Amino acid sequence: MSTIHSFTEENYLKAIYHLSTGNSSVVSTNQIAEMTNTKAASVTDMLKKLADKKLINYIKYQGVTLTETGKKAAVNIVRKHRLWEVFLVEKLGFKWDEVHDIAEELEHINSESLINRLDDFLGNPAADPHGDPIPDRSGTIHQKKLVRISDMLQEQSGMISGVSEHSSVFLKLLEKMGLTLGTKIMISELIEFDGSIILTVNETSDRTISREVAKNILVML
Amino acid sequence: MSTIHSFTEENYLKAIYHLSTGNSSVVSTNQIAEMTNTKAASVTDMLKKLADKKLINYIKYQGVTLTETGKKAAVNIVRKHRLWEVFLVEKLGFKWDEVHDIAEELEHINSESLINRLDDFLGNPAADPHGDPIPDRSGTIHQKKLVRISDMLQEQSGMISGVSEHSSVFLKLLEKMGLTLGTKIMISELIEFDGSIILTVNETSDRTISREVAKNILVML
DNA sequence: TTATTAATTTAGACTAATCTAAAAAATAAA
DNA sequence: TTTATTTTTTAGATTAGTCTAAATTAATAA
Ligand SMILES: [Mn+2]
Ligand SMILES: [Mn+2]
Ligand SMILES: [Mn+2]
Ligand SMILES: [Mn+2]
């Protein structure tokens, strides 16, 4: 199954997928250009090709959505990306801020049996090192309900289970502050002045984080 | 270190490397075309490019050799290919006849730290699943002295340690006959009529193999 | 040593993916 | 509801890698 698409086509499909699971499900040419580091003109060319292959629904000037086929292809790439990230962290000992670029290449390796064996080898993990859910082999995604720390109330507690910002600087910062996945936190104080928040970590020590940081840490209540 | 070369350039370098470690160290355009499944005209184009990049020594109509830089690049690809094969067999449970094509893709993933970590994770193996030596991170290859079964004498014994034919049909045949790496064999009889050979396997049972098969099994005495 | 055959290179063309600059359409502002 | 701005598309080029067919060079045979 799953026809072979070029490296490049796969990157576009993944970009469209990620953009469409964000705000609006319709994605614009410029958004895609930005995400894929290309120019709008190049995107238009590729959109025509993907539309010809029935991977996207595309009407000139109206943006695109993925077809069922396109979505399946995209989810499969996401599955591969996240499984490889787990491998890199769990088996090879990479840090969570070091794996993205390598997984970006590995996700294009084409072998159904490879990825399913890898999945088993890793113990069929539910989430990648950043807490993002790993689609199962049928393409189903079991997304846990998570809330941003910035949306939590005084005294509320939970466990850090994901991030919505994947840059290396951000991840390293969390690492340094001891705010990695699995850490228990409690909202100890909400600072009115600038919206920053004081957390109690693992029921022991305190940490102050800015609103900007708080917005990008996801917690399971 | 190690400048980035395209997927395609890497495949050419590897082809030239393998061809030049065979018989003559000078490799011809047609040989490369055959190994890379392309046409001679395409090879000529690529040879010019590789020569410009100082990866090969190329004089029109005279064939090519790798420069030191080119050889280093080629050996590094071979290292990656073989390490990935070990991973696929040892960790993911693939059979030795199933891994070549996947490794053919994985060998192009570009990350020094990835491959060195993988090497460590696998326990710094000396050889791949087909008995081929794995270059160390400095590019040195520790090749063991092996002889073809077809070159062995009556009563001589040794351990199967490699193959010089990597096709799936051949590997499956060996698998079925129990002639896998690590098997102890002894030359029990040389059949004059057709050159076929009767082996005693693990000091117990006997196997008859054709001269053609015998030529492709490598033994450590 | 000349003629024939084989190997290699050049010429010219094609596809995928990209770009810049210009044109067209859609959106926002006046 | 015109005008201005932004977004998107088209036009025309470029680069990497490939091909077929023709020309050239080398190797082999007569
Ligand atoms: Mn990618
Ligand atoms: Mn991730
Ligand atoms: Mn390859
Ligand atoms: Mn091998």
Image: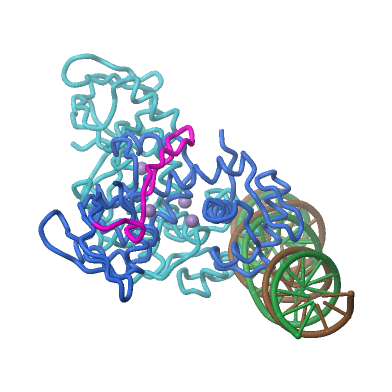
Chain colours: A blue, B cyan, C green, D brown
Give A162 or C18, whichever is nearer the viewer: A162
The N terminus of chain B - image quarter: bottom left
Give B17 or A123, whichever is nearer the viewer: A123
Residue shown at 36% from the left, 48% from the top: A146
Residue shown at 19% from the left, 31% from the top: B158
- The picture quadrant where one finds residue B206 is top left
Question: Magenta stretch?
Answer: A132-154
Q: Is residue B114 above or below residue A66?
A: below
A58 left or right, relative to A128:
right
The C terminus of chain B - image quarter: top left
Assess whether residue A144 is covered by the magenta stretch: yes
Using the rendered image of the protein, determine whether residue B118 is visible from the camera's viewpoint.
no
Give A108 or B85, whichever is nearer the viewer: A108
Give B3 or B13, whichever is nearer the viewer: B3
B180 left or right, relative to D21:
left
- Residue B44, percent across and down? 61, 63
- The picture quadrant where one finds residue B87 is top left
Using the rendered image of the protein, determine whether residue B210 is visible from the camera's viewpoint.
yes
Q: Is residue B39 above or below residue A98?
A: above
Q: Is residue A126 above or below residue A194?
A: above
- Residue A62, percent across and down? 73, 57
Q: Residue furthest top?
A: B205
- Residue A205, percent across and down? 12, 62
Residue shown at 59% from the left, 68% from the top: A38
Assess whether residue A179 is covered by the magenta stretch: no
